[in-house]
Image (spheres, grey):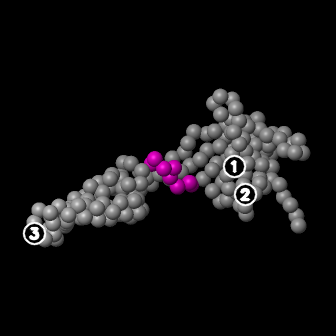
Amino acid sequence: MRTLYLSTLIGILVGIFVADPGLISKLIGSASGALGGFMIGVTIASLIVPGYVPRHNVTNEPATLVSMRNVDCIYGAFIFGGGNFGQQTTYSFMVKLDDGSMMPHSVPANQLVRLIEDPSLENVGYWRTTVSNLDPSSALYPWSCARDSWEGELVRHEFRVPVGSVVQTFRVQ
């Protein structure tokens, strides 16, 4: 945000000094300078400065996965692979909410997914998401417009499930 204030102030000063003599000219010059400085500041604060702000990974609390069954009545499967959305393969799963209800989810089956079959787990699974956010303790952070109100850059989806509970659908052609 400081970038916006500073660039707007610089725009006002440049507008005043560049304008012709006279009150009206100075007012128009300062207004146009403020607008130009603000637009330049938004560009710098949202596109350039965030690239120099250090980042840190934030992992959310694990969500509890609900054991599902498929059409073949395979019980105990926590994650089903093989679903397609367009040309993208997805992993589908059910998350247990605080009120006891279940909500379906799916994530793209790509290099950001980690499936960990944990022998210590039985009849329960967990899903965690790790994102990379800007570090608010950095000195450059106040000069940036990009804040942690957005979700950040996805680092990984981690699934911890009992051994043998990941089901993948294969089709040979």
139, 17: nearer the viewer: 17
From the image, tell me which residue sits under label 3. 21
Sequence-wise first label, 1 or 2: 2
Q: Which residues are magenta?
A: 148-155
Q: Judge the density around disc 2: few (<14), some (14-19), many (≥20) Cα neighbours within 10 Å.
A: few
From the image, tell me which residue sits under label 1. 106
Is residue 116 a member of the stretch shown in magenta?
Answer: no
Q: CA distance from mark 2 to mark 3?
A: 64 Å
The amino acid type, in three-letter code, at marker 3 is Pro
- Please, what secondary structure does the residue beneath circle 3 have? loop
Image mark for residue 85: 2
- Please, what secondary structure does the residue beneath circle 1 have? strand
Image quarter where the C terminus lies is bottom right
The amino acid type, in three-letter code, at marker 2 is Phe
Sequence-wise first label, 2 or 3: 3
Q: Position of residue 128 (x, y in %)?
A: 61, 44
151, 60: nearer the viewer: 151
The residue shown at (88%, 41%) is: 73
Question: Which label lies toward us, 3 or 1?
Answer: 3
Q: Are marks 1 and 2 in contact (CB under 8 Å)?
A: yes
Q: Residue furthest left?
A: 21
State whether residue 128 is above or below residue 171. Answer: above
Sequence-wise first label, 3 or 1: 3
Q: Are marks 2 and 3 in contact (CB under 8 Å)?
A: no
The residue shown at (35%, 60%) is: 42
The residue shown at (32%, 65%) is: 40
Is residue 152 a member of the stretch shown in magenta?
Answer: yes
Residue 35 can be seen in this image = yes
Q: Judge the density around disc 1: few (<14), some (14-19), many (≥20) Cα neighbours within 10 Å.
A: some
